Image (spheres, grey):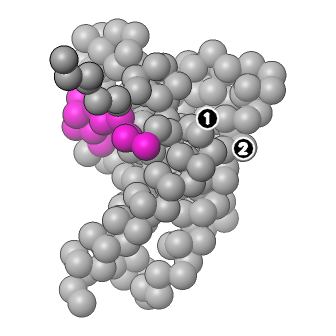
Amino acid sequence: MDNKAIVKDFEAKVKADLESFLQHKEALDAHVPECPDVEDKWGEIAREYMPDGAREFQQYPVVSLGWAMLIGMAMAYYWDTDWAKYSAEKNIYGQLRDRRGYDNMDEAVVEDVLGYTGEAAEKITELVAECASRVYSLLSHEHVEPGTEAALGCYIGALHQLYLAGMAMELNALGYHMTPLQQG
């Protein structure tokens, strides 16, 4: 199997796992919300995030993965509140990171951006950590040789799916429930 096929299959596996897990936790509806505006920002976000995320992955893989989910949540929140402003921002990842530093980006996003406090903040942080741990387990069992193009592709694919899951989870929390319209 070539690298593109390996990465595509891995991303599909991560997406299915995250959606199923988050639906079980009632953080997503059966029909997952989508937001092309936020999805389209992924390439820019990924380029900004990769130097930090890749550096941290060796010692803190769950953090490296989980922060992508938090970024997706923040982007969905920005889309809901003032997309005209936030979509024009350059280096939005850097702005999120620099609020409290890379190591405290979970608190910066959960508390400062999303406004969660106390038990609600703890629940969100735990859910993100559970998702990142699940994805790290999938990544660890993918049987791709570390340091290869396929391994990098799977890591980027994992980040992408976590970003999209974070976006969908926050859209759901904001009340964007994708339900069929009644005919009649």
Position of residue 44 in the picture relative to residue 22 (left or right): left
Residue 116 position in % (x across, y down): 67, 20
> What residue appears at the point 42 percent right and 36 percent down from the top-left corner?
168
Residue 23 position in % (x across, y down): 53, 46
On the rendered image, what quadrant is the C terminus found in? top left
Stretch of the chain drawn in magenta: 30-42
Above or below, 119 against 33 in this view is: above
| Amino acid type, callout 1 | Met
> What residue appears at the point 37 percent right and 52 percent down from the top-left corner?
160
Q: Does the magenta stretch include residue 31?
A: yes
Determine which residue is flagged by label 2.
126
| Amino acid type, callout 2 | Glu
Position of residue 90 in the picture relative to residue 30 (left or right): left
Label 1 vs label 2: CA separation?
Answer: 14 Å
Above or below, 5 against 72 in this view is: below
The answer to whether residue 95 shows anywhere in this view is no
Position of residue 2 in the picture relative to residue 86 (left or right): left
Q: How crowded is mark 1: few (under 14 residues within 10 Å), some or many (20 or more)?
A: many
Above or below, 122 against 51 in this view is: above
Label 1 SS: helix
Residue 148 position in % (x across, y down): 36, 82
For marks 1 and 2, the one nearer the N-term is 1
Res. 21 image quadrant: bottom right
Q: In this view of the protein, which residue sits in the foreground, 78 or 55? A: 78
> What residue appears at the point 46 percent right and 38 percent down from the top-left corner?
29
Res. 65 image quadrant: bottom right
Q: Does the magenta stretch include residue 41?
A: yes
Label 2 SS: helix
Q: How crowded is mark 2: few (under 14 residues within 10 Å), some or many (20 or more)?
A: few
Residue 90 position in % (x across, y down): 30, 25
